[in-house]
Amino acid sequence: MKAGAIKIGELARATGTKVETIRFYEKIGLLAEPSRTEGNYRAYGPAHLGRLSFIRRSRDLGFSLDQVRALLSLSDDRNQPCDAIDLIAREHLRAVDAKIADLMALKQELQSIVGQSHSGSVSTCRIVEALEPLPH
């Protein structure tokens, strides 16, 4: 193997990414396929590590695969204005704010249901009643 080259398992451990996910990212074009060793093993380099770390961090922050693809494309040309990246981040922030609002409403509903629970049989349990389907 070339000096500085790492195998897929090492890349997976270094980035906290499953081997299957790395192969998937290669398949969909987010990560370039690496060269192969004489034994036909994938030989990843520092560029793969950096790009996969970027992908992983973006996914951890909740960016979609399409957004990650756009961010990678934009980041490949470091001389262009940051406006397009800001737009993607702002759109994602709006989606995160909407999810937070939904989760807060869910939390309030659950607190209300839990607050109405009392001891007794399941037939009188408010949580079960709230989860049952509505009559048609």
Image (cartoon, rainbow, N blue to C red):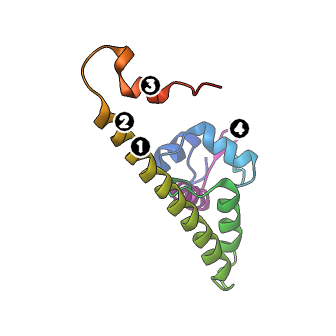
Query: Mark 4 — residue?
Result: 40
For the C terminus, the image quarter is top right
* Amino acid tagged 1: Glu
* Amino acid tagged 3: Glu
Identify the disc placed on residue 86.
Answer: none
Q: Residue furthest left?
A: 119
Give residue 8's quadrant in the image: top right
Q: Separation of disc 3 and disc 4 at Cα?
A: 59 Å
Q: Describe residue 122's horizontal placement relative to residue 94 as left or right.
A: left
Tell me how many marks there are. 4
**Secondary structure type for disc 3:** helix
Residue drawn at x 69%, y 78% is 77
User: For the residues carrying marks 4 and 2, which lies nearer the camera in this image?
Assistant: 2
Query: Mark 1 — residue?
Result: 109
Give residue 71's quadrant in the image: bottom right
Q: Describe residue 14's horizontal placement relative to residue 5 as left or right.
A: left
Q: Separation of disc 1 and disc 2 at Cα?
A: 6 Å
Magenta span:
37-58
Q: Separation of disc 4 and disc 1 at Cα?
A: 55 Å
Query: Mark 2 — residue?
Result: 113
Query: Mark 3 — residue?
Result: 129
Q: Separation of disc 3 and disc 2 at Cα?
A: 9 Å
